[in-house]
Image: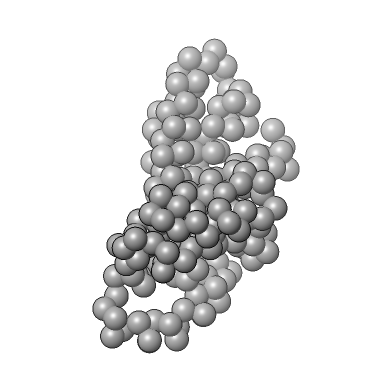
């Protein structure tokens, strides 16, 4: 399997995972009384309304070039805390919905990939030689677990930053709001000039690989 084909599978899996990640935010917000995402037309599987130029295109492309794998984010689903029944508690659950969805998708895809691998008659010597179904399921599991871990980092605009924001004492919020706009810049610096993401994500990827193929 050529690199271009593998990259195509990776990006295809990433698009699906990111869309389901964002829809889950909107669905949980809707569950708690906020109809903003539905009214904005964001509870859809159509990828176009979810595309964020930086998080969906630029960052994944840079990460593919620098690390060989990629994660990112979609355009954030609009949530109005004022329409939630218990805004401070509910926003924490809304923020957790995306990574939790990715972890559930990862578990399902990993179990499926392991089942197919254990029952395949292939004598493949490399990942690229495995049946296409195993490659797609494993890649989908890989994308989802990396997306979950990445989005839990406490850096704006990632979900982890929303958790920090909701858990901080009210007196600390003004300072947090001052540094929040620089989150994307920090992420770019970390991607381009450090190995932080590789160091963080590689052990997770290795554990997933061992579960499916060992």
Nearer to me, 203 or 23:
23
Is residue 10 shown left or right of residue 5?
Answer: left
- Give coordinates of residue 55: x percent, y percent: 60, 62
The reply to whether residue 58 is visible in this rendering is no
- The residue closer to the viewer here, 78 or 130, is 78
> Image point 35% across, 65% down: which residue?
87
Residue 15, given in percent of the width and then of the height, sits at 62, 47
Tell me the quarter of the image containing the C terminus. Answer: top left
Q: Position of residue 143 (x, y in %)?
A: 52, 45
* Residue shown at 55% from the left, 66% from the top: 191
- In the picture, the quarter occupied by the N terminus is top right
Question: What's the image's color scheme?
Answer: one colour
In the image, residue 82 sits, relative to residue 97, either above or below, namely: below
35 left or right, relative to 85: right
Q: Position of residue 63 (x, y in %)?
A: 60, 59
61 and 196: which is toward the camera: 61
Q: Residue at point 50% right, 75% down?
A: 183
State whether residue 41 is above or below residue 122: below
Q: Is residue 16 left or right of residue 104?
A: right
Please tell me whether residue 101 is drawn above or below residue 175 in the rendered image: above
Q: Residue 77 is drawn in which quadrant?
A: bottom right
Q: Give the tally of numbered discs.
A: 0
Quick check: can you spot residue 168? yes
Residue ID at (49%, 45%): 144
């Amino acid at each position: 399997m050529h690199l271009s084909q593998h990259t195509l599978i990776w990006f295809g899996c990433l698009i699906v995972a990111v869309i389901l990640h964002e829809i889950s935010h909107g669905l949980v917000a809707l569950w708690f009384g906020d109809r903003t995402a539905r009214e904005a037309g964001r509870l859809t599987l159509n990828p176009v309304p979810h595309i964020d130029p930086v998080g969906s295109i630029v960052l994944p492309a840079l990460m593919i070039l620098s690390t060989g794998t990629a994660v990112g984010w979609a355009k954030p689903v609009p949530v109005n805390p004022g329409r939630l029944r218990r805004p401070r508690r509910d926003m924490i659950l809304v923020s957790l919905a995306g990574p939790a969805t990715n972890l559930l998708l990862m578990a399902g895809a990993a179990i499926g990939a392991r089942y197919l691998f254990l029952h395949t008659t292939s004598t493949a010597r490399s990942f690229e030689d495995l049946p296409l179904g195993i490659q797609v399921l494993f890649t989908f599991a890989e994308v989802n677990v990396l997306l979950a871990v990445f989005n839990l980092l406490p850096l704006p605009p990632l979900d982890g930053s929303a958790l920090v924001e909701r858990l901080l004492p009210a007196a600390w919020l003004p300072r947090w709001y001052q540094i929040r706009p620089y989150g994307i810049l920090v992420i770019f610096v970390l991607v381009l000039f450090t190995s932080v993401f590789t160091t963080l994500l590689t052990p997770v990827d290795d554990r997933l690989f061992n579960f499916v193929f060992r």
